[in-house]
Amino acid sequence: MKECLLSIQEQTYSNYEVWVIDGGSVDGTKAFLKTVTGKVYFISEKDSGIYDAMNKGVNKGKGKWFLFLGTDDKLFDNKVLETVFGQSEYEKKSLIIGNVVYSSSQQNKESMFFNSSFSRKLWIKNTVHHQSVFYRNTIFKYRKYNLNYKVLSDYSLNLFLYKDKIPHIKLKNTIAVCAPGGVSKQYNWDLYREEALLKIEASNIIFSPFFYLLSSLKFLIRKIYK
């Protein structure tokens, strides 16, 4: 978490606020957050998982744009916010989409680069890394993270936003450096079941067989080649 906060505090662009949503941890996080200076605010209380915490962050934040980072993530460099927001207003856009790299990319930069794509490919897989996206605050006035999805609620949100034809802009910029692990990288059947369910919710129940078949095939391929 220290590196994450430091990467924000070192930004050359200072028009931001940070909300840390802690799930009532007892590992010293709350004590540490009390020592952090600047525009960093926090709440520490039990929640129903990562997406409940992200919804709480949305409710607390007062900014025009939201970016969600995990405790093991950090901004790519100290000019990320200045490069994205220093000269542009994006008045007609609701999503600003960049890219991410994974933290182990020092060994293999090419394969660890994630180029987010907001396109029809979302119906096949999640092509938008949520740490690469700035979401306009108005989005969350009509759609929040669905707590029925414990692992892929960010995917569900991205798919609905694509379906709703939310205006966006794709940048070449790398926004964040992300940890390579996470619950979405465990590749168990619950993950693929969620993927099928969220696609059915975003489309039509008649497509259930297709999406379950697609998820089953992806699960089997992962099991064989892991």
Image: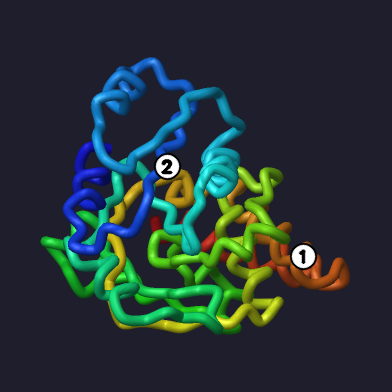
Q: Who is closer to the viewer here, 22 or 159? A: 22
Q: Nearer the viewer, mark 1 or mark 2?
A: 2
Kind of residue at badge 2: Trp
Q: Who is closer to the viewer here, 226 or 92? A: 92
Q: Quadrant of residue 204 in the image?
A: bottom right
Picture coordinates of residue 55, whole percent (x, y): 59, 45
Residue 194 appears anywhere in the view: yes
Q: Which residue is mark 2?
A: 19
Residue 216 appears anywhere in the view: no
Which circle's residue, 1 or 2, is located before the other in the chain? 2
Classify mark 2: residues with Cα within 10 Å, few (<14), some (14-19) or many (20+): some
Picture coordinates of residue 188, whole percent (x, y): 54, 47
Q: Which residue is mark 1?
A: 200
Residue extending farthest to the left is 107
Alpha carbon separation for disc pair 1 and 2: 33 Å
Q: Secondary structure at mark 1?
A: helix
Q: Quadrant of residue 94 in the image?
A: bottom right
What residue lies at 63% left-to-right and 78% top-to-bottom?
166
Residue extending farthest to the right is 206
Q: Quadrant of the N terminus?
A: top left
Q: Quadrant of the C terminus?
A: bottom left
What residue lies at 45% left-to-right and 46% top-to-bottom?
186
